Structure formats: C-alpha cells, structure tokens
Image: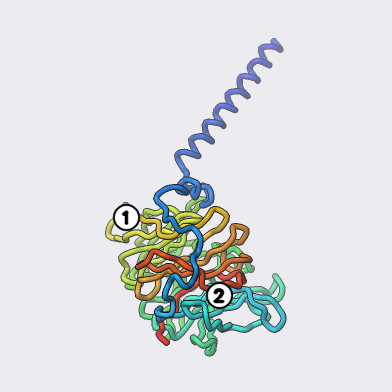
Amino acid sequence: MKKQTIDKRENLIFNLIIVFVLILFISHHAFPQRFSNRSRSREINETNLPEQRIPLAKSKLNLSKIPYKIVYESFQETEGSGNWEICMINADGSHLINLTNTPNINEFYPHASPDGTKICFVAVEGETLENRSRNVYYMDINGGGLTKIADNAYQPCWSGDGKQIAYLKGEYSRYSSNSWSNRGIEIYDLKTKESKPHPKSELGMLFNLCWSPDGNWFTATSRARGRGGSNIVFGANDTTAMTLSIRGCRPDISPDGKQVAWGRSDHVLTIGNLDLSSPQNNVTNQTPVIACQDDYMIYHVDWSPDGNYLTFSYGPTSGDQAVGRKAAGWNICVYDFNTGVWVQVTSDGKHNKEPDWVPIRY
C-alpha cells in the first residue's frame, strides 16, 4: 500500500514537470513579443541590415549645410557639481550651449516647438525623496522665460501648431524614477494656461509620447501590454486606439506623416510607411536604416524638420537608455538619408541622450 502511494506521488510529480516544461515552450514560441528587446535583437541580427556598424568620421557628411540645431539631455558639470542639463549644438556638434545651468535641478527630455522658439522638458526638483517631484516646464530657445505647466508629470511633446503641450501624469503622488510610472494624459494650452485630460483616461504605463504633425494622433510605447511593450496609436481628441504593426519601441512620425521611425532592437533603427487608415497592417515596407555592433546600442530616433535626416543616441551597452539614467560614453549621431551614412556629432560621452531637432534656421 505504501509503495503504491509513493508510485502515485512520483507519477504526479513527473506529470507536473512535463506540464511545466510544455507551458514554458508554448509561452516562448507563441508570445515572443513578451520578451525583452535584447532577446529580439538576436533574431534580426543578421537580417538585411546596413553594412555600416560604427560611426564614420564627421567629414563623411556635409553637416554644415544642415540648417537646424539639436537639443539633448546631458550630464554636465555645473558650478562644480555634476547633474543633468539641457544642451544645444549645431548639427555638426559645434557651439555647445548649456541652456539650463542649474546645479540643484536635473533637466531631461527636451523637445523643441515646431517654430523653434521654445523647448519643453522635464525637471526633477527637490533634494530628498520626501519632497522630490518630476515636473514639466517650457522655456524660450535661449533658456529664458521658464514656465512650469505641471507638477508630477512626464515626457511632454508639442502639438503640430505649437499651441499645446501634451504630457503624461504621474501614477502616484510620490516620486518615481521610472519613466513609465504614469496614468492619463493631459493637454496644456499655452494661451489659456489651462490643462485638460485626454478623453481616453485609462491610458497608462506609456513612454515616448509623440504627437503627429497633423495634430490628429498620438503614438507611444506601452509597458502595460507585456514585458517587452507594444506600440500604440490613439486619437488626439477621441478614444480611437489601435496597435502599430511594428516590433520594438519609441516610434517617431515623420514631418509629412507618411513614415515612422523606431528602434526595432537595441542595435537597429528602422523606418516604414505609415497608413493609419489600416488598423491591422498600418506600417509597411519596414526597412532597417541604421545598425550598430552588438556591444553598443542606438536609441531615441528623431526626424529632422525636412525629413532628410535622423538624429539618435549611441553608446555602450553598459549604459541605460531610460530618461535621466546614466549612460557613460553615449553620444549624439546624425544619419543622412541621401547618402545612407551616419556620423557621431558629439564626442564627450557625457551621457548624451534624447536628441531633438530644433526647427530654426540661423
């Protein structure tokens, strides 16, 4: 009798092990999108990628002809103390300006207005965790005219006409360093100085909010749809929503609204044709345009105002691509669609990330 009981237990344990192994196998093959970008990157590592894998010399591009500047977040030394600042450079990396210069405040995630006169960004204020807050501001292009528009807010972006700023609201009242710790979208009107909630109130765990140039759509990556995230597009003024038919993260819509660029993996940036009238297959002709070596990463792609260039951040895999996280050795790069060449335009490696074109001619 005792032997029969032992045999039954052994059979039960064996059957449970078999079931567990089957579940793991099915989960991995049926739901690969739930695994991280880094595991996905190995799947496409040798698939139709550009030959260039490291930045070429700046002399390979005529950067001086690009009539725009670039703003980005950078860990700079300000009054003897290292902290995050908003910096601006010419497209060739020259004429570096620290626009914020605040030794006791960390500023991140700059986005220039469509007319190039203002920059919205995030500032972390407060010296202790008890009083620390992540807030949204905008300022003039020269660093003056500082205006706070929201407390406990994340990752702002401009409307196509430059009259409004959208931002993500913090999920909790206490401070969180996670860029996806948010719930709900607010839209601030520069004329009335008032904010109103987006009608799709359940949106949350988003990052890289992007407003389409025509003002009709938002795109974002959602952590709420699996560990690896998914990319969503939703109406700017209604509750319409759909999933972009891409793998990866941080989609950015081209100035003419006809294309989208995104990070397909840690090592590949891709573009595709965008058609939001098709809810199922809305990104077609997906083409990798930039790739880097396995021990480096490329992130934070942004279209130039004329659609002829991309800017992005590039650095060792030891760095963290998240907003305001340290990434030693990371720099800002520029890609030229006409030549298919990309170059590194900063060289100090001071955690330079989140570049954004300034659509203004000097």
Q: Secondary structure at mark 1?
A: strand
Residue picked out by circle 2: 122
Residue 321, which numbered label? none
Tell me which residue sits at (46%, 70%) in the image: 334
Q: Earlier in the sequence, mark 2 or mark 1?
A: 2
Q: Tell me if I can see residue 264 in this picture.
A: yes
Which quarter of the picture shows residue 64?
bottom left
Tell me which residue sits at (66%, 75%) in the image: 83
Residue picked out by circle 1: 285
Q: Position of residue 137 (x, y in %)?
A: 53, 80
Q: CA distance from mark 2 to mark 1?
A: 35 Å
Considering every residue shown, the one lying at the far bottom of the view is: 145
Q: Tell me if I can see residue 224 in this picture.
A: no
Mark 1: amino acid: Asn
Q: Nearer the viewer, residue 233 or 313?
A: 313
Position above or below: 349 against 205: below
Q: Position of residue 204 (x, y in %)?
A: 49, 61
Q: Nearer the viewer, residue 233 or 303?
A: 303
Q: Looking at the rendering, in which quadrant would you find the C terminus?
A: bottom left
Q: Looking at the rendering, in which quadrant would you find the N terminus?
A: top right
Q: Nearer the viewer, residue 208 or 46?
A: 46
Q: Position of residue 201 (x, y in %)?
A: 45, 65
